[in-house]
Structure formats: structure tokens, C-alpha cells
Amino acid sequence: FIPKMQCRQLLRCISRSPATSSSSCFGVARRQVHQPGGFDTSFGFEEVEPGQKQDRVNQVFNPVSNSYDVMNDLMSAGLHRCWKRRFVASANPRPGWRVVDVAGGTGDIALGLLEWSRKLPGRAPPPVRVAPGDGSVDSFREAAERQTAAAEAEAPASCTVSVVDPSPSMMQVGSAKASAKGSTFASSIQWLEGRAESLPLDEASSDLYTIAFGMRNCTDLPGVLREAHRVLKPYGRFACLEFCSVENPLLSILYDEYSFRVIPPMGLLVAGDWDSYEYLVESIRRFPHQTLFANMMREAGFSAVNYEVLWPGVCCIHSGYKLPSV
Amino acid sequence: MLASIAFRFSAGSRLCVACRLLSTSPCESQIRGQVLDEALARVPDLGWTRSCVEAGARTLDLPETMADLAAPRGGADLALYFIDSCNDKLEAQLKLRSSGLSSAGEISLELVGFACRERLSMIRPLLPYWPAGIATLTGSPSLALESAARLQRLADDICHYAGDRSTDLGWYARRLAVGAVYASTEAFMLQDVSEDLVNTWAFLDRRINKDLAAIRTARQVAGGAFDVAANMLGLARR
């Protein structure tokens, strides 16, 4: 059952000609809502007061939390898994690191980081020495388990992740996934409710700060970057995976058509929510260009800032380091 | 688009193709240089790998994140740094020895020989491990492009300091020829077991005195191809 109003929206979207689609109005707000006093921030193409944005964002994410992962798979045809895996490989967390993952509600990145640090490529598992016993498979397996447990007890086997997210329902989905994977994973993740602009963490407490597809939902980008700088240890690393401006003109046309014509109807059919997914594609367009965002990172105090665009060119990984000030 | 690829190709180490470095503060390049220099000292033990770079960082009391900063792509970045530092040292030496300018397109073969010998001698300390280093640079198309850009930069430096100020098509042919001389001699050197590499130096002398000497001016380089094309189009004049 699709409500009549949204049926009309669906038909309008499909029949709209490319010239009038919102993609050609890049940078122009479609729905202007001016608030008295206070500066406006963007909520998709809508202008809202900063205080309101976080509530609006929560309204988007609380209801879609259950179908979030399914929708991600559908919208990106499974590509988001490749991007996230590449992001984790690039962040390269080592065992014993303390990682803070912001806006990582459903736990994709947190679980990926844990798995990566457990199975670092090039790190051989400790050799198992078995005393000559009865030579049976079971005794060997028991000896192997005992020795691996002993080795893990003396040195940390993986990193620890603190996931900070403003939406409790998203984190519920995430912690259910972590428990399903096993107690070793669930015990290494800490779920904290909070906003990126004011993290519930101590200064200089993390080796790595990651944020995947969450930066565009943040109200105050310089504030988020300053907070990331505060929370990182000296020599710590900042990594951000986010949709970027598409450089290739042909891809840009295809991408715009796909974003504005296919994604909201898909959201309606699968998650029952047209507006949330329209907000999603609009917030991507309002996010600063990748070079501008890199400059913002430099202004916040990060060094060695660069970005790497992932195939097919719709998202990129920004990376920076907090070098100690001399 | 082709022009931009060509520009990136010719810029050598000054522009990264895969990972665009937008700016480099002095502190960051200092750290990168120190970590990778320490890592190069450990290549005989750990190879051209990320763990080698991490060991280098550990020697300087820096955390593993600095290994990621210095070498985002692991061993390949270490190998590229080795090539770049050798090229920089060679350029410094060539500046001191550069011969007179020549706009006719003649380059000093003696200087080309000196430059190639100097550059190859810089590889000698890591010679048994260098084939593995080259292998890390064949991992992906972007890495292959970058290592080709390094060779192009090397050939350009040698030709420039050997006196080439020409502005015709021979510019490209000369750099190609010098690049080919260097690359073939390096490949020969990797499997040379003679005492003190005498066979390599003899090979280098043969390449320079026979092949390079044959390509002296633009007319000779481009002339052959133009004559063939002119004949085919019926434009040849006697």
C-alpha cells in the first residue's frame, strides 16, 4: 500500500524531464525555509536552523534503521561493501589500537576494523608446538586452541572500537550484528550515544578516527574536525569515507539521474520512506567539494591531508594525521 | 584527457597519479624522509614491505601511523622513494658537472656515461634485493605509470645536463634513447655476477658508443620515418 500523496510524487519523479530535475539546480535550494535570527544550515536542499538539523537527522535515521543495510545494498548494487572494505584496508588498524568510529551505527565499519586488525595480512599466526602425544586430530586441535588463547592473553589480538552515534536504534542493529559474530567481537566494541561535534571521549585517547558516510549528516563540519583533532593522540590518523563531487561529466549525468529518479522510489518501495532517501541524495549534493573539505581538514590542524577517489568516482577517502605541534 | 595523462606522465615524481598530495608541510616531508631512510637500512632483513617501513618508524620512536603516512602503499612507496632519492642525488652531482649548452641537439656522450655509471652505482648496496623492489612496482597500472615517470625524469635530467637544449622532435627521441640505455643496463646489472660488475660497465660502454652515437641529430632520428611516410604518400622528391 503506497499513500496517494507519495504515488503522485512517484509519478511526478518518473515523468519529470531531465531539464527540470533537481540535479540541474545544483547549489540552488529548492525549498527555502528562513528562520528568524540564527544562521541557516542545510538539510538536503532545505535550509534549517542548526539546532533543528540534528532532530531532523534523527527523524531520518531512527525509522530506517532496520532496512538501512538492505537499502545500502540495493542503492549501490553491493558496491558499498567494496568501498568500506577498501576504507578499512586504507585505515589499517593494528592490534592494540583504540579506534573511534563516528556515525557508525549499524557497525559495518567497526566489525570490519576488528576483523582487519585480527587478521592483518603478513602477520603469521604463532606456530603451534605439539608435544608428541597420541597424534589424534582432537588433541592437536585442543593444543592449538590452548596455545592461541595463551598467545592472545599476553598480546592484544585486535583493536578496540568505540562507536559514537546519535541514533540508538541504529546502534541496536549494530550490536545485534556484533553479538551474532561472536563474543570476541562484541566485547571489543563500545556503543556510545553522542554527536560528532561533542564526542563523549577524552582528549588524546584514540589512535584512529574513522567516519564512513556520516560526515554529510553533521551540522558543523569545522566543529566535527576540531573535535576529531582533540580526541586523537599525537601522530593519530583521521579517515573519512564520503560521497564526493563527480568529476567525470558522463558519469555525473548518469549519477544524477539515478540519484533523483531511482533512489527515492526505491526507498518508498523497500523502506516505506520517500523523504529520508530524498534527503540522502540531496545531502550528498550539498557536501563541499573534495578539495574544499581537504582544506577544512588542514585548517583544523591535520597534516599530510590527501584524498583518494574510489571507483567509479562517486566517493572518496580523505586522510589526515595529527602531527604534534613543535 | 590524453593531454592531461601525458602531463602527469612527464611530471615524474613531482605529481602523484593515484593519491593526490595537495600540500606538504615541512614537518611531514621531514618525517617521511627520516622514516623511509631508516626503512631502507632494514630492507636486507625485511624486504620491500610495510613491516620494513614500520620497523623504520619504530627505530625513530614513532608509532605505526607514521609508517602509513610515509608509505601509504607499503613496499611500493619505499621502492619509489629509493628511486627518487637516487635521482635527486644524481641531479645534484650532474649540476656540478654539466657541460656547455648545445642547441644543435648534440649531447655529451661522456656525461651520459658518467651519469649512468653514477646512478647504477647507487643501486649497488641493495643490488641483491633490488629485483624484489622492482617487482613491487609492477603491482598495478598506476604504479607502473609512476615508475615509468621516474625513468622519464631520469632520462630528462641526464639529457638536460648533458647539454640538450633542442626544441624539435629529437628531444623525445634522445630521451627515449637515454632511457633505453639506462633501463637495459640496469636489467643487465641485476643478473651480472662478474667481479666488480666489469661486464655491466662494458655493456654500458657498448650501448652508449654504438646505439647512442648512432642517434646524434634530430634529422637522423626523424628523417628515416619521415622518408618512409613521404614515399608512401607519393610526396618524395629526388
Image: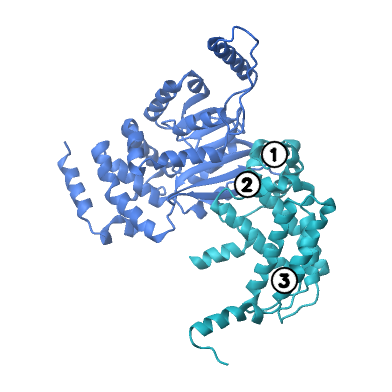
Chain colours: A blue, B cyan
A264 or B75: nearer the viewer: B75
The residue under label 2 is B136
Residue neighbourhood size for the residue with mark 1, other residues' Cα within 10 Å, grouped as few (<14), some (14–19), many (≥20)? many
Mark 1 and mark 2: Cα distance apart in space:
14 Å
Position of B171 relative to A187 (above/below):
below
Q: Residue at x 65, y 10 (%)?
A: A131
| Whole-percent x, y for residue A288 in the image | 46, 52
The residue under label 3 is B212
Mark 1 and mark 3: Cα distance apart in space:
39 Å
Q: Secondary structure at mark 1?
A: helix
User: In this orientation, does residue B160 appear?
Assistant: no
Evaluate whether label 1 is on the same chain as label 2. yes
In-image side of A278 versus A5 (left or right): right
Residue A43: mark in rendering: none
Mark 3 and mark 2: Cα distance apart in space:
30 Å
Label 3 or label 2, whichever comes before in sequence order: 2
Amino acid type for the residue under numbered disc 3: Leu
The residue under label 1 is B52
Q: Quadrant of residue B45?
A: top right
Label 1 or label 2, whichever comes before in sequence order: 1
| Whole-percent x, y for residue A200 in the image | 52, 30
Q: Residue at x 61, y 43 (%)?
A: A321
In-image side of A65 versus B204 (left or right): left
Q: Residue at x 77, y 61 (%)?
A: B203
Q: Secondary structure at mark 2?
A: helix
Q: Secondary structure at mark 3?
A: helix
Figure quadrant of the N terminus of chain A: top left
| Whole-percent x, y for residue A28 in the image | 35, 57
